Image: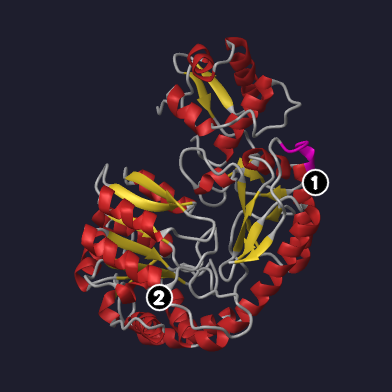
Amino acid sequence: MLSVPESQLVRLLGDWPGAQPAAAPGYARLAAAVRALLLDARLPAGARLPAERRLAAALGLSRTTVAAAYRLLRDEGYLASRQGSGSVTALPPGRLRRHASWVPAVPDDEDALDLALASPEACAELPAAMAAALESLPAYLHGHGYDSYGLPVLREAVARRYTERGLPTAPGQIFVTGGAQHALDLLLRCLVSPLDPVLVESPTYPNALDALARARARVVAVGLAPEGWDIEEFVTALRQILPRLAYLMPDFHNPAGYLMSAQDRAALATAAAAAGTRLVIDETFAELPLGGEPGPALPAPLAAWDPAGQVITIGSMSKAFWAGLRVGWVRADPGLAAQLQAARGPSDLASPVMEQLASAWLLERADSLLPARSESLIRRRDTLAAALAGHLPAWSFRLPAGGLSLWARLDAPVSSALAHAAERHRLRLVPGPRFGTGGSLEGYLRLPFALPEAELLDAAARLAAARASLGPAAAAPMAGTIQMA
């Protein structure tokens, strides 16, 4: 059984008194903070918490306060007392974890509005793509259907798309996976050993943090600046830490929405080559620019500035076309593709043929299909931004030029408490700390604009009601602003 040391729990709790309603008694605020850690899997179910006396000493509280908090959590079903094991975390009946571990376990309420996932509905052309795939399928039925590298027709389509974006690519450099997360998992299996340093941005994608934790990597986070990447700071980190790997999102960063300039891409690729660091570039959102009017051409993929073959690129169909289309890929040298193929075998033999054929059909028509997707998302982004400015004027955020979410700075460090309060208003949120390490980012919240406009208006009203239920801000409010990223 996993035991959580008091030092680790204190770190995860962070500024727990300031993140909860001030009117609540101390034991209730502590219980709420532990509950929030459980709901978004920062604390796993089935873990043994520190003894009451030890946690009380670590937090500077009376044992009575900790005992009352534990008792409240047991009454709610979040703790179980086991003979010889102390207090063990649990999820109460009715709490379901339908998605990734970092998406909070919530009651099974089909009418709740979901601002947890940044995934819109399928593109309108998906039925046509599946029909075309079915028409092409007979040509593949004579064989066993396994191709662990991916169907040639899809690898050719992906390679052609990279070439069109300014990165000459051969089909032999493409390895097809079951999505971007599968791609990252395979790469970590091949390239990272326990305790290897891996550089990430802060904030970053929670699934990537979970994958790095499973790989037992030593995560080194470099914070993003208000305008995006401080490239000098990232270059310094590469030189001093010499990380084995760096996982970055330069194309409409998730969750912040930033787009890295061509100059910064060149500097980063050069510094990584000098440090011997493999860059893993996640381009999941690269095909979703939201600039509106035609503007300057987007920078080429970061690998176009790669002087030494150190840059590995991950892509996916999930955001631009549909998350239910579980097809992704890795662009790398053929030698690494062979390593990925060997690592894949024990758990996954190949990607589904139908989905690969449909993906190839969509990619071949991407230039004609994606503008409508972007136009729809621009309307949704602007709808949510205007609603937030009206309902929550003390919050601030940048209007991203791409991607699927706003990264909002709150008026107080109440992100975890707000996510819990939002449940009572049938609204699902992921608290800011899930996008970072060490319990930070309580003052931030990712707000996807993947829902239809009418639902986004309703969600903003529910969000404001949830924030009001927490009482006055515990810190001086920020001036409410909307800026273009």
- Quadrant of res 407: bottom right
Q: Specify start and end residues of the magenta stretch as a single range.
A: 468-473
User: Height in image: 77 above or below 115?
Assistant: above
Secondary structure mostly seen in magenta is: loop
Nearer to us in this view, 26 or 38:
26
- Quadrant of res 136: bottom left
Element marked by disc 2: helix
Q: On the picture, is 284 further left or further right than 76?
A: left
Q: On the picture, is 105 further left or further right than 309?
A: right
Nearer to us in this view, 59 or 404:
59
Q: Residue at x 53, y 45 (%)?
A: 434
For the C terminus, give its image quadrant: bottom right
Tag 2: amino acid: Val
User: Height in image: 213 above or below 383?
Assistant: above
Indicate the position of residue 30 as horizontal and vertical percent values.
Answer: 62, 25
Tell me, for residue 153, which label it has, or none. Answer: none
Between the C-alphas of marks 1 and 2, the distance is: 47 Å
Q: On the picture, is 65 further left or further right than 351?
A: right
- Read off the residue under disc 1: 465
Tag 1: amino acid: Ala
Tell me, for residue 353, which label it has, or none. Answer: 2
User: Height in image: 11 above or below 148?
Assistant: above
For the N terminus, give its image quadrant: top left
Q: Residue at x 72, y 40 (%)?
A: 421
Question: Is 469 one of the magenta-colored residues?
Answer: yes
Q: Residue at x 76, y 58 (%)?
A: 389
Q: On the picture, is 461 further left or further right than 303?
A: right
